[in-house]
Structure formats: structure tokens, C-alpha cells
Image: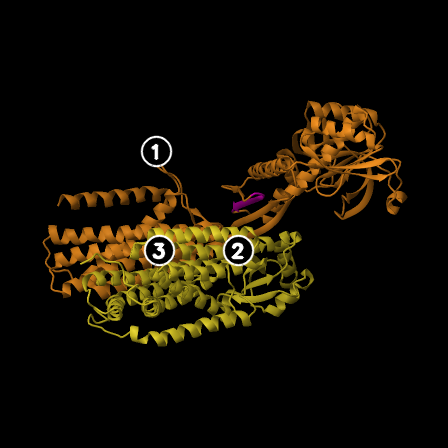
Amino acid sequence: MKNLKWRVVLVVVVLLGGLVYLTPTFTSTLPPWWSKVLPKEKIHLGLDLQGGMHLILEVDTDKAVENYADRVAEEMKETFRKERIPFTKVERTKKWDVVVQLAGAEAQTPLAKLVEKDYPVMKLVGAEGVAEGAMQVTLTLQDFQVNHIRKMSSSQALETIRNRVDQFGVTEPDIRPQGEDRILIQLPGVKDPQRAVALIGKTALLEFKLVAEDVTPQDVKEGKTPAGVKVFPMKHVDSKTGAVDMTQIALKDRTVLTGEALTTAEVRLDSQYSTPYVGLEFDSEGARIFERVTGENIKKRLAIVLDGTVYSAPVIQDKISGGKASITGSFTMEEARDLAIVLRAGALPAPVKILEQRTVGPSLGQDSIRKGLLASVLGGLVTIVFMVVYYRASGLIADLALILNIPLIMACLAAFGATLTLPGIAGIILSVGMAVDANVLIFERIREELRLGKTLRAALETGYSRATLTIFDSNITTLIAAVVLFQFGTGPVRGFAVTLTIGIVTSMFTAIVVTRIIFDYLLLQRRVRTVSI
Amino acid sequence: MQWIRPDIDINFVGMRFKAFVLSSLLILLSLAAMVWRGGLNLGVDFAGGTLVQIQFQRSTSPDEIRNALSDLGFAQSAIQQVGAASDNEYLIRTDLTTSELADLSRRVEESLGKAYGQGQATVRRAEMVGPKVGHDLRQKALFAIYYALLFIAVYVSGRFELKWATSGMMVGVLIIGVYLLEAMGMSVSYLIVGALVVTMGFCWVLKLPYALAAVLALVHDVLITVGIFAVTNKEFTLEILAALLTIVGYSLNDTIVVFDRIRENVRKVRKDEFKKLINDSINQTLSRTILTGGTTLLALVFLFLFGGTVIHDFAFAMIIGIVVGTYSSVFVASPLLIFYQDWAGGGAARPRKKPA
């Protein structure tokens, strides 16, 4: 008797808990006292239900390592000059090998010593004589450094993208690393996926380079460029027609300043034509460099290069102090705003590639919810009717368990912060099937026991205890499949595995515990002699 | 109400040879269909590619859409109507996955806007999966199915024959072996097929008939379901994989209920002949098997009919799986125990029991 009371308490507590967790999902405004102590998490809807975008990006970490090796090669030139090691060329060749050409073989030993002392990240891999007295030494980045840069660039890319998305203004974005060099991004409810992709995927490497004034357009055409000069594409936008025209321009390879020196970037409006442009501000170090370079190169041109494309190359009229600059280029308001965001959030350490992109429009999501619910309700109703027809009063008891099962699953979803997806709705329907299965097992067993001539009470007792074992065994195996599915799956499939798992557990609870309480109550409290089964 | 009479006594075990022929035939047909089709019709999840779902305001045809999209390089695309005819919804699929296709949905909408008039066609869903991701997912899918089967084998041997240690060790060896072979760069599909065969061999040698029967029945269910996807040339997507794994769980559910009864009956009636014992166990649980299969099937039929385009094929796979799974737990899994006993000799397949 006491036993029954405790079981009732347990069920009531579970149901109340479920109710508490469900409330935030079904009311739009929660009283303030509620949000303080009680859960306020709503059930998350998957992207397939509420619409939005799912992206998987791959960070080109090789490129990040190559960039690093480039920088090391540049530094080496400086050091070799200082240490008076005669060299003719220092250059990164394939991947992150750096080849040093020495004027004489005798320079090899001091070079090896210097590398060991000043460049512990590099190691010597080969040396060969190339010509009379000349020597070619190949260095490469140590593996630990390569791995370190890979890791750093992945995590930095993740951080940068997070910053950009935050500033873009998406509610509840989900951005996380996946594997070693992949980033998973989920943006629910994004209205303009294209714009979001452009914003997230832009490398946004801002560089200032001096124009190589002595190279004529003719030279550029013929590909005759002196050492230290490189040809870049340049974008011209006709401010009236908006037509884009690409030309070529020769720039000095050496970068004067990069976007790293920026403290802020914001959209401003040109006072004359009220066209938007992006205003930049440098930190003190950057401002100093900018002042010096502009002072030294008056009447020459300084190019603003973004991701390898020249946006403008204005003539320096005067020394610019104060660390301010601007990027113009006939932007629309939206483009200017996005450019400012990516410049503020910083450049990606390496380019990213889109491996997977999925967009679901909000209308399809709503359709899916509506249809999923319709199918669930119909399926559920037919099952409920069937149980009553087949098992009479006992079927009614099973139906009660069945109906309790659904809010319990929803409550668990809210409590665990799980995501409800379309396959997840299918998972709920299936677990309704499971809940029925448990009761069918129990009732069939009870019928068998009754046939053996047992009293209702005895039949119930054996029926429940025997069937519980079977239910347990058979559900555990489904649980194994669900857990593997969870491990494997992404997005919708994972949502399905979660709902299925929750459904298995709650259906065991309602089908075994709840129905048993009702039977016990009828038999023990109300002294009912027969229950149709 | 009672549809299946309590004293029902169908000689299922006697039909085991016929069932064996039928099952073998179905599996062979499935394999043949897969070979004939040159593999499954993999969806963009697994094959890589681009999928766009478009809703039109008026009725149209695949050819008209193809014309409208001709300048986007969609000549090779498959265009297919989905949902009810009145919905005017179409799926367009291509193998292209370049990064320029990132703004594909906008360009599709633009091109269709030109041909059909502004706002006449809306992109409702656009999915682009790179070939690398597709390849990774294919491998992961095979591993997922294999590991699910393996863990189930441990549980079954443990619960029904108390052979936790033996089966646990077997799985340990298999996992390490598979891991090493994969690290050595072996093709994953061959690896998994090989591993499955080795697993069966282990079950046989280590005398784990229950695990052997259960896993074989599951492979049977999965193969036939996949085979029907090959025959109908329906797309095999991530959702279908989820369905397959659920079928594995569900079909096993059925099998376990029968095994559980066998275990119970062995304790009760020791003198019974093994064949009769198994047949009785199947008959005693038959009513439950059919009722549960029936109600689940009913729910799935509603999902199939009303669940919308995205869920349609998922429900289709589940329906096949439930039918095949119910059949296999009656006609395949339990009779396999008898085959095992006949071939391995002795009472090896009898569950352990306390000495009398």
C-alpha cells in the first residue's frame, strides 16, 4: 500500500517536472519570478524545421603554414645580412621548404649554426653544390611547428568567424570546430544566406602596398617585372552604371601595413555624394609606420589591397599622421557594412573552403512542422483507438500512458537542450509505437497467465514481472542502435537519435510504471474484481 | 478482442527451408539489383553534389525548368517532381560542387525569375555537399552500421548465453583489427564486408549461436531494405541511413522477444525437443509480434502519406524494414538456431541453464 503511494509520488514528481520544463516552450512571456529559478529553455527547433543555414568550412591550414614559412624566409634575409652570411637568394619553394642559395660552400657551417641558434623552428634537410662555388641549402619547418600553426590557424579562424557572426547579428548561432580543420556553422533564420556566406568566408586580408611607379603598363602586359614587384588585379567600379572593370597594376611586393594594425573600421558617408565608404583607424604602431611611409613617398601612389585585389591606389598628397585611412570603391550600404565587420573582426589566418552548405527556407520548415504534426496526430489517434478496441479497459489505461509519453519526450528535449528535427518527429511517432509494444507485451502475457487460471492479481503480478524483463532486453538493443546513430550522425540524424533515445526511456517509464499504478489502484484501492483485457 | 487464438500452433520451424530459399533469393536479388544499378543511387549527402528544391506558383514541367536553367550549366541535372501534383514542387540535382555554386540558390532564383516572372518560383531548400564530405560520410555510415551490429552481438551473447567475456573479447579484437586495417589504408567498403564475415566466423567458432542468428537476421533485413532502394532507384540519403539503423534496433526487438521466450521455456520444459521448443516460443509470442508490427506499421503509413516530401522516403524505408524485420524474427532468426544446432551438432544452441 505504502509502496503504491510512493510510486504515485514519483510519477507526480516526474510529470510536474515535465510540465515545468515544457512551460517556456508554450508560453511566449514568462513571469519574471519564473525566469529566475525555473528553466527558461525552449525546445530548439532544428534548421530543417525553422529554416536557416548549415555550413561546414575547411580551413586551408596548409596555406597558413606556407604564409608562415614566407615570413620566416623574409626574416632570414635580414638576419643573414646582419650576420654577414653571403647569400644570393632565400625563397620558399614547395610547401614549407625554404631554399637558401649561398655564394660559397664555406658559408654553410655558420649558416647551420645560425639556424640552430636563431631559428629552432627550422631544420636542415639537404645541401648540394649547384654551380661553381655556389651552394644550395634546403631548410624546412619542423613538424611540431607545422602542427602548432595548423592548430593555431584553425582555432583563430573559428574565433574570427564567431566574431563576424556575432557582429552580423544572428540569433542563437552555433559555431563549433569539427575534426582538425573543419568548422561547423549553423545559423537559424538567416534571411540572406548569400550575404552570410560572403561575410563568413571572406579571408579579409587587408594590405597596403606601394605602387611600382617605374613599371610601365607595357611591361605589365609583357610580363616583364623586376624582382620585388608583383602584378595585382585592380577593380574599377563605374560610379554611375555600377559596371565592374578589372585592370592590372604592378605593386611593390613588400607590404607596408596589414589589417592587423587596425583598431577599428566603420561605415561612413561621403559628404559630397553621400556614398558609403569604410573608414579605418590604426593603432599607434600602425599610425607611426603609416606616417613615415606616406611622408617618404609623397606624390607616389599607395595601393589598398583586399584579398589580393586592389581596391584603390590614391596618390599620396601629403604626410598622413593620426593613423586614419579609408577604403572607397562604390560600395552599396550593405557591402560597406559587411566589409567593416570583417575588417573589425580581423582577417582569417588562412582561406576557408565551403565543404557543405544547406539552406532551408522558412516556408518549407513550417510545412514540415505542419505535416509532421498531422501525421503524428493521425498515427497516434489510430493507435489509441486500436488499443481500446483490442484491449477494452486495459487499452484505455495503456492509452493514458501513451498520451503522457508525448509531453514527457518534449520536456526531456527541452531539459537536455536537444534539438527537435523533422526525423525527430518521426522518432517520436516511433517511440509511440514502442510504448504500445511494451503494453502489448504486458497485456499478452497477462492474458496468457489468466488462461492458466490465475486470478487477475496474480496474473498482473507475473505478467508485469516477466514482460518487464523482455521489454528491458529488447529496448536496450534499440538503445544501442540509437547511441551508435548519435555518435555517427550530424544535424537531423542526431536529432532523430536523441528523440528515439529519450522516447525509449520515457515509454518504458510510462508503459511499465504508470500503467501498473493504475492497475494496482483499481485492484487494491477500489477492490475491482475484473478489468477487461 | 483476440485475433490470434491462444492455442495457435503454426509449424514455422517446419517452413524453415522454404523461408531459407525465399530469404536467399531476396538477398541475391538485392545484390543483383545493386550490381545492375552500379551501386546505390546515393543522395548528395553521400555522393556530393547540389540539390535545390523549388516551389512554383503555376504548373510546369521538368523540361521547361531545364530550359530556364540552361545557362547555369544544369544540362546534366536530374529534375523530379515531389509531393502532390498541385504543390508544383520540384527537386533539381546536379553533381556540381564548385565554390562558385555557393550562391547557386540566388542564381537559380534569378534565372527562373526571368523565365517564369518575378516571384513565380521560390527556392525552398538548397543543399551543397562537397565530394570530400560525401566520401567521409559514406565511410562513417558503413562503420556505424557495423559497430551497431557488433555491440548488439555482445549484448545478445551476454544476456542469452552469459558469454559476456567471450563476446567482449571478440569485439575487442575486431575493433582493434578494423582500426589497424583502416589505418593501413584499406578500402572501407571491403573492410566492413570482410569484418562482417569474420564476425560471423568468430560467432561460429566461439559458439555464440544467439549472436550469430541475431546478427545474420539483421544483415538480412538491411540487405533486403537496401536492395529495394536499389530496385526502385530511390535516393539513399542520411535519413535513410537513420531508418536502417532504426530497423536494426526494431527488428532485433522482435527477435529478442522470441529469444527471451526460448530462454524462459528452456528453463521450464527441459525434456522438450529443441525444434518444438523454438516453434512453441514463436507461436506463443506471435500475437505480440503481429500486434506491435501492425501498430507501428500503421503509424508509419500515416507518416508516409502525410509527413511531407522530406520524410516520405524515410517512412518508406521504415515500412519495408518493419515488414522484413517482422518476417525475419519469425522465419530467420529463430530457425537459424536450429540450423546451427544441426550443423554444429549437440545441444550447443541450447541456452545455459542451471543443472537440475
Spatial CA distance of label 2 from label 1 is: 46 Å
Q: Where is residue A196 in the image (x, y as percent from the top left)?
A: 60, 45
Answer yes or no: is residue A382 visible: yes
Mark 3 crowdedness (10 Å alpha carbons): few <14, some 14-19, many ≥20: many
The secondary structure type at the circle numbered 2 is: helix
**Position of A265 relative to B315 (above/below):** above
Q: How far apart are marks 3 and 2 (CA)?
A: 23 Å
Q: What's the chain of the residue with tag 2?
A: B
Q: Which residue is drawn at 84% across and 27% down?
A: A298
Have a look at marks 2 and 1 and say if they share a chain: no
Q: What stretch is highlighted in magenta?
A: A180-188
Residue to which mark 3 is pinned: A477
Please, what is the three-letter code of the amino acid marked with disc 3? Thr
Q: Where is residue B150 in the image (x, y as percent from the top left)?
A: 41, 56
Tell me which chain appears orange.
A
Q: What residue type is labelled 1?
A: Val
User: What is the magenta segment's predominant secondary structure?
Assistant: strand
Where is residue A34 shown, x and y percent of the image?
Answer: 34, 35
Residue carrying label 2:
B139
Image-quadrant location for residue A398 = bottom left
Which chain is indicated by disc 3? A
The tint of chain B in the picture is yellow
- Residue where numbered disc 1 is placed: A37
Residue A276 appears in view: no
Type of amino acid under label 2: Gln
- In front: B225, or B101? B225
